[in-house]
Amino acid sequence: MRRYVLDLHLSRNQMLRLYQGSASAVVGYARSGECVRFPLHSLRPFVDSDGISGTFELRVDARQRLQEIRRLSKA
């Protein structure tokens, strides 16, 4: 499995897109500099009243499909 570490900061308004259906993916840069795209719905467990903020680890399989996401720290 491959792993990516990302720092994410999505405002409450940005996360509203998830619930409104106007966004389906998050695109960000891992600390390694690689561009990473993954399903927005995978962040639902981490949403609070301010949106999402923190450092996350994504694990993907050999086909680059998301297998696991976890928060390493909250900003």
Image (cartoon, helix red, strand yellow):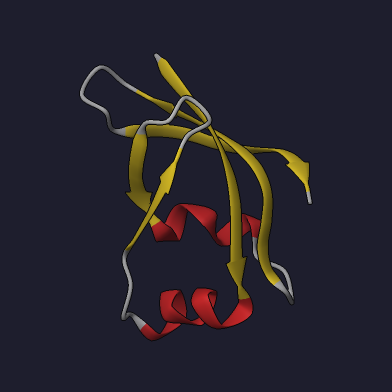
Classify 15 as above or below 54: below
**Where does the image place residue 50, in percent across and percent down from the top left?**
73, 74
Horizontally, residue 59 falls left or right of residue 36, namely right
Task: Return the residue found at the far front.
Answer: 33
Task: Return the residue found at the far left.
Answer: 63
Residue 64 occupies quadrant = top left
Horizontally, residue 52 falls left or right of residue 18, namely right
**Where does the image place residue 19, in percent across and percent down from the top left?**
45, 80
Residue 6 occupies quadrant = top right
Horizontally, residue 62 falls left or right of residue 8, namely left
Q: Residue at x 51, y 76 (%)?
A: 14
The N terminus - image quarter? top left
Q: Residue at x 69, y 57 (%)?
A: 53
Q: Residue at x 31, y 80 (%)?
A: 22
**Where does the image place residue 11, in percent across and percent down from the top left?**
61, 73
Q: How many marks do you count on the picture?
A: 0
**Where does the image place residue 74, in percent across and percent down from the top left?**
78, 48
Q: Nearer the viewer, residue 48 or 74?
A: 74
